[in-house]
């Protein structure tokens, strides 16, 4: 039974967002797909855009979505997956916070005959039949694109400080790898400091403050910041400004994600480049769910296309940004 659009919208407006775990009642009809979505949290604008894309697509397709926010904790994601299995959902969508520790619960899902669609981050498992497909960007290539751009901008010479993403997370591991590959070709490019800013603006600012004070104490010149996401880069912008320096010119800032605030910072000349990592994975995720439930085979990895945006195009592109 399909609920009419206008009624559906009313139902959704009425549904209190419980924050930790709740369901969109969009598809509560008996013939609607029931899907569990274990989301990492709400640490960045990118993450919120991904959540919105998946929840909105569920509504559009009349899917009964069970949503769980893990508050950055893998144990909460594992608990959520076990709850979805107990509820006998038709499929699970998982954005895995880190790469390891998933085999036991993925074996339980497989035993229950429930397909698992990975979005945005991958997992390290000995048997890749434990998940149906991974829909994600190529993070190593994102790191390479950021590194190549910076090598050119600095003419192959400069001291770089790095703000890494969540320790153990696929994007943090791979963006570091790709960037190092790109800058290794220019011996004058040195990564002088590197630690996690946990993909958040506040931690990115805090770490950048320690970098700046350490550099002052050591008489070290910081030429550039490489941030694994825009939120940390924007935190670094704040720290650099508060230190009396000009972000985007005294210190070059290179980042990844492509969120709207990054384009606004580029228009203001405070950020130099962002490599887009598209979070609007809802349509692809539910296409994969529908195929998996229908027993159709799927590619093991569905790569999301990325693109580099620098200050020269920021003003023109900003009005077109969807997240
Ligand atoms: C990338 C995603 C990362 C984003 C961050 O697919 O996992 O996590 O780059 C987000 O903004 O926190």
Image: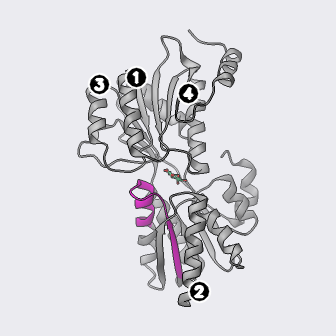
For the residues labelled 1 and 2, the Cα–Cα distance comes to 56 Å
Q: Nearer the viewer, residue 72 or 190?
A: 72
Q: Is residue 275 visible?
A: no
Q: Earlier in the sequence, mark 1 or mark 3?
A: 1
For marks 3 and 2, the one nearer the N-term is: 3
Residue 169 image point, x, y percent: 41, 54
Q: Nearer the N terminus, badge 1 or badge 4?
A: 4
Q: Is residue 193 above or below residue 312?
A: below
Residue 68 on image: x %, y %: 49, 34
Tally of marks: 4
Mark 1 falls on what kind of element?
Answer: loop
Neighbours of disc 2 within 10 Å: few (<14), some (14-19), many (20+): few
Q: Secondary structure at mark 2?
A: helix
Real-space Cα distance between discs 3 and 4?
Answer: 23 Å
Residue occupied by mark 1: 90
x and y percent of residue 119 in the render? 45, 42
In the rendered image, residue 168, in percent from the top left (x then y), is placed at 38, 57
How crowded is the residue under tag 4: few (<14 C-alpha within 10 Å), some, or many (20+)?
Answer: many
Residue 102: quadrant of the picture: top left
Callout in the foreground (3, 2): 2
Determine which residue is flagged by label 2.
216
User: Closer to the observer: label 3 or label 4?
Assistant: 3
The stretch of residues the image draws in magenta is 159-178
Circle 4 residue: 58
């Amino acid at each position: 039974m399909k609920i009419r659009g206008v009624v559906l919208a009313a139902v959704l407006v009425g549904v209190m967002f419980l924050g930790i775990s709740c369901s969109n009642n969009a598809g509560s009809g008996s013939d609607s797909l029931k899907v569990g979505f274990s989301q990492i949290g709400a640490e960045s604008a990118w993450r919120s855009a991904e959540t919105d894309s998946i929840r909105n697509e569920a509504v559009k397709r009349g899917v009964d979505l069970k949503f769980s926010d893990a508050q950055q904790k893998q144990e909460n994601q594992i608990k959520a997956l076990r709850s979805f299995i107990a509820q006998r959902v038709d499929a699970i969508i998982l954005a895995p916070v880190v790469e390891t520790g998933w085999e036991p619960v993925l074996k339980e899902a497989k035993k229950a005959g429930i397909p698992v669609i990975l979005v945005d981050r991958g997992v390290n498992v000995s048997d890749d039949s434990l998940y149906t497909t991974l829909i994600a960007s190529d993070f190593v290539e994102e790191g390479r694109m950021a590194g190549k751009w910076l090598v050119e901008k600095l003419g192959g010479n400069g001291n770089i400080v790095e703000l890494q993403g969540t320790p153990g997370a696929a994007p943090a591991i791979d963006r570091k790898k790709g960037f190092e590959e790109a800058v290794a070709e220019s011996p004058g490019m040195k990564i002088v400091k590197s630690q996690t800013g946990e993909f958040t603006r506040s931690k990115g600012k805090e770490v950048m403050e320690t970098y700046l004070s350490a550099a002052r104490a050591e008489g070290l010149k910081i030429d550039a910041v490489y941030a694994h996401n825009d939120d940390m880069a924007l935190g670094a912008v704040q720290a650099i400004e508060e230190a009396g320096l000009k972000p985007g010119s005294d210190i070059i800032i290179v980042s990844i994600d492509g969120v709207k605030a990054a384009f606004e910072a580029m228009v203001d000349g405070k950020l130099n480049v962002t490599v887009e990592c598209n979070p609007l994975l809802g349509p692809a995720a539910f296409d994969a769910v529908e195929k998996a439930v229908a027993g159709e085979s799927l590619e093991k990895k569905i790569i999301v296309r990325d693109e580099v945006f620098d200050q020269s195009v920021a003003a023109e592109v900003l009005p077109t940004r969807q997240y």
